[in-house]
Image (cartoon, coloured by chain):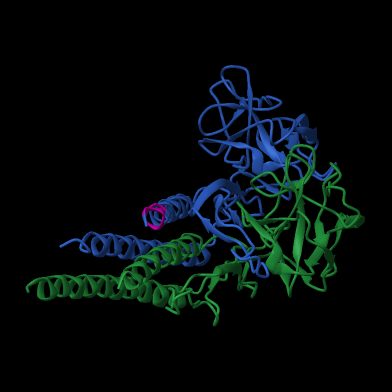
Amino acid sequence: MLHRLRNAVASMGELALRQDRVANNLANANTVGFQRDRAFAQALDERLDHEGTAQSTRVAGQWADQTGGSLQETGGPLHLALEGEGFFAVQDASGQTRYTRAGEFVLDADGTVRSPGGLALLRDDGVPLTLPPSGGEIAVTTGGEVSVGGVAVGRVSVVQPIDPRALVRLDGATYASAGVAVEPAEARVRQGFLESSNVDAVREMTDLIAHVRLFESQQKALQTTDDVLGAVARSLGSF
Amino acid sequence: MLRALRTAALGMSTQQTSVDNTANNLANANTTGFKRARVSFQDLLYQRVRAAGGEDGAAPPAALQLGHGAMAVATVGTFTQGGFSETGNALDVAISGEGFFVVQMPDGSQSYTRDGTFTLSAEGVVVTPSGFAVEPGIEIPPDALEVQIQADGTVRARLPGEDEPTELGQIELVRFQNPAGLRMMGGNLYGRTEASGDPIQAPPGMDGLGTLQQGVLETSNVDVVQEMVELISSQRAYELNSKMVQAAEEMLQIANNVKR
């Protein structure tokens, strides 16, 4: 009987974690380049303990859903969106490389192309992309070649991790590169567009409702188990 | 549980920032030389709830990381060209292309503007509607018959009894490596910051700067349809997050009811 109690409690804990994930997806519904989190509860997630009793379902983990979000036209010369799989390589303040699909960039005072959060966009030779102070029209080809006023200044690095599921999420819709092997990606760069998040409001709302109701049914299971235990104690105890 | 509640609350406040910004853009849809801003969002730190790798050494699937919502990191000014509206007024000037007019503030500092609605002060100096002198402080004689401002910024006026106009000075423009880093000071004025870099000054038409057009004003670059779409999208996202708050609340209540 105590297995059932434990199962219900574990299940409620997992559902709460899943609901946290839905909350984060919804909070980032309008974040540029955000990729929604998917939890995967595997088919083999029920295990038997040594007495042969089923243990509760566990969320085995999660990964970022890499389906592309829709492209939103902004006309900004440094707004870049990726069509197809791949990531921009950016560098944080400590010199670490990160990957992101959020292609919203601005220039800083030195002409370095950065995200609004301060991450520098890298060229394919691993050096931050800088634009000359001369000014002029910024053009980015679909192959990622950047030119200012007709003068080529480098090519934007677009890469694809060989195992995308190994990426570790960081803030700012970025992923840490630590230990993940990458290869050049085929994705095309679209200038003047931003990729919106790939959060699907309908799917998140259905998940949200399901989590609340499952949580409720686990609570009922818990209470029913408690009732049965109570009845057992009362009836067997009256001899 | 409380994580979901707080995450959703952050999501709501982020969307609120977005609506505030859209409201300001729309309010300035008819402001001369106004440049619309957009809010840039980011997701927040992730907490590793469970590291990759099974408990019994099974193949590591992926870690369980939970995020903490979203926040606004920056409002980025969009310095695209606005439209032009003809006024026929001799002292209305629009910049076609990059650049800002330099305005002398009363405290001696400089600020910058795209709004070329100029007038004359009591002393005959070219000033902005708020009365700040436009660099380099061009004085127009009170008896000038016809004022010309040319594409390269040269100001000329024909004086009575003369056939050829007299040159009075040249309006210079500045541009910044990163105009999005300028500080918005209100009154259509921008201030220099560390992020914008130092102003690069030159006559109009030189060094990547735009040219001047007399008798024309630059309208704002606010696209009302785009702003409405932003507004709808922010409002719906706000609503979604409010549903999350309700759901989290309900789950807390259910948890509380375990004990009868």
Quadrant for the N terminus of chain B, please.
bottom left
Tell me if I can see residue A172 in this picture: yes
A128 relative to A201 in the view: left or right: right
B170 relative to B108 in the view: left or right: right
Which residue is situated farthest in the left direction here?
A239
Q: Nearer the viewer, residue B7 or A139?
A: B7
A88 relative to A206 in the view: left or right: right
A58 relative to B193 in the view: left or right: left
Residue drawn at point x = 41 percent, y = 54 percent = B3
Tell me if I can see residue B210 in this picture: no
Chief SS of the magenta region: helix
Which residue is situated farthest in the front direction here?
A239
Q: Position of residue B237 (x, y in %)?
A: 43, 64
Which residue is situated farthest in the top direction here?
B107
Quadrant for the C terminus of chain B, please.
bottom left
Report the chain shown in green: A
Residue drawn at point x = 56 percent, y = 49 percent = B45
Picture quarter containing residue B184? top right
Q: Nearer the viewer, residue B56 or B253?
A: B56
Q: Position of residue A97 (x, y in %)?
A: 77, 50
Picture quarter containing residue A38? bottom right
Report the chain shown in blue: B
| Image: magenta residue range | B2-6
Q: Nearer the viewer, residue B149 or A50?
A: A50
Q: Position of residue A158 (x, y in %)?
A: 81, 64
Residue A131 drawn above or below residue A213: above
Say if the magenta span includes residue B100. Answer: no
Q: Position of residue A55 (x, y in %)?
A: 44, 74
- Tally of marks: 0
